[in-house]
């Protein structure tokens, strides 16, 4: 890690955030120091998540559960766990939650399992399952008789490869790397974009979630684009779901997630 450290214009030690390797090793150091991981890695060109922001999502879910009187014996499901497996790892390490991570991509599944197996004892808290039916989100993952206090998701936010490319170029410009096209945070296609982007993905998730209302307490998903919220609310109201939006902020970055649940005594349409 030391070779990636530099002194910035303010005289403080920092790293070059446009350097993917530097970002990766920073994350490895944070996970080893704060969460006692023995090792953690991701394949080339997969998303390298900012650890503090990911931990924020976990903490806010804990607040959501605590308001319902839920503090122990928590089991959560991460939709789209990715190669980094970061949410299950943080949930297990910070709160001792039992976590299930699901993904459609075999390479992501293999890498997530490797990250779990790299730290002794972590496998007692985390299970990884592959979604074999890409038309579904929960079906095939949530088994009969299983109960989860929450689900979480960081959906692909771009609607197309072209939009993802445009977003990448803007990020590189902001990092002063206009001539380069190597994402510092990486990202496989299934991590960055899907048909219809996050709005359609979350809409699909909401439609399917009502079928699992007796097995799952809170359904949650990050929403990167605030302008998508009205359509998300419209779908939730149509199914008569109780919902709220939780705003988060990490430094200058603002983010949010929408959370919803169903009254078991009332059937959705």
Image (tube, grey):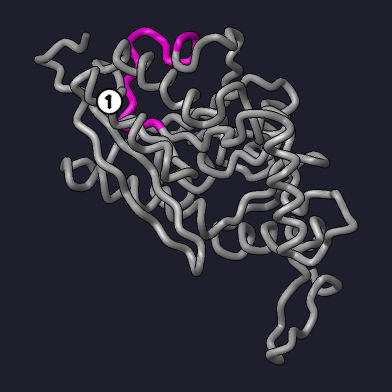
Q: Residues within 10 Å of mark 1 (few under 14, many from 20)?
A: many
Residue at which label 1 appears? 236
Residue drawn at the location 68% of the way across and 46% of the way down: 167
Q: Based on the displayed image, in which of its 4 quarters is residue 193 positioned?
A: top right
Q: Based on the displayed image, in which of its 4 quarters is residue 160 positioned?
A: top right
Spot the residue most to the right. Answer: 179
Q: Nearer the viewer, residue 161 or 47?
A: 161
Q: Position of residue 66 (x, y in %)?
A: 22, 47
Compared across the picture, whether 178 is left or right of 143 comes to right
Local SS, label 1 = helix
Q: Position of residue 55 (x, y in %)?
A: 47, 54
Q: Is residue 24 above or below residue 218?
A: below
Dominant SS of magenta comes to loop
Residue drawn at the location 69% of the way across and 57% of the way down: 28
Compared across the picture, whether 147 is left or right of 42 comes to left
Question: The N terminus is located in which quarter?
Answer: bottom right
Q: Based on the displayed image, in which of its 4 quarters is residue 238 positioned?
A: top left
Question: The C terminus is located in which quarter?
Answer: top left
Residue drawn at the location 31% of the way across and 23% of the way down: 235
Q: Is residue 133 above or below residue 256?
A: above
In this picture, which residue range is highlighted in magenta?
139-151
Spot the residue most to the bottom. Answer: 11
Q: Is residue 166 magenta?
A: no
Q: Position of residue 52 (x, y in %)?
A: 52, 60
Q: Nearer the viewer, residue 41 or 174?
A: 174
Q: Position of residue 268 (x, y in %)?
A: 20, 12
Compared across the picture, whether 22 is left or right of 127 comes to right
């Amino acid at each position: 890690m030391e070779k990636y450290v530099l002194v910035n214009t303010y005289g403080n030690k920092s790293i070059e955030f446009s350097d993917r390797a530097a970002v990766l090793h920073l994350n490895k150091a944070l996970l080893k120091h704060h969460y006692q991981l023995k090792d953690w890695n991701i394949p080339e060109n997969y998303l390298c998540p900012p650890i503090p922001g990911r931990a924020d999502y976990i903490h806010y879910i804990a607040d959501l559960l605590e308001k319902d009187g839920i503090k122990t014996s928590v089991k959560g499901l991460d939709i789209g766990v990715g190669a980094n497996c970061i949410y299950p790892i943080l949930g297990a390490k910070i709160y001792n939650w039992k976590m299930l991570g699901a993904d459609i991509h075999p390479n992501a599944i293999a890498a997530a399992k490797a990250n779990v197996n790299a730290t002794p004892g972590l496998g007692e808290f985390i299970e990884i399952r592959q979604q074999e039916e890409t038309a579904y989100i929960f079906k095939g993952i949530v088994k009969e008789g299983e109960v989860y206090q929450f689900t979480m998701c960081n959906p692909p936010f771009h609607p197309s490869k072209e939009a993802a490319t445009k977003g990448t170029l803007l990020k590189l410009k902001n990092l002063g790397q206009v001539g380069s096209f190597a994402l510092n945070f990486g990202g496989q296609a299934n991590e960055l974009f899907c048909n219809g982007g996050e709005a359609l993905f979350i809409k699909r998730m909401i439609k399917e979630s009502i079928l699992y209302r007796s097995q799952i307490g809170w359904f949650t998903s990050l929403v990167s684009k605030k302008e998508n919220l009205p359509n998300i609310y419209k779908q939730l109201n149509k199914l008569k779901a109780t919902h709220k939006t939780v705003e988060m902020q990490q430094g200058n970055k603002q983010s949010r997630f929408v959370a919803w649940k169903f009254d078991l005594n009332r059937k959705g349409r």
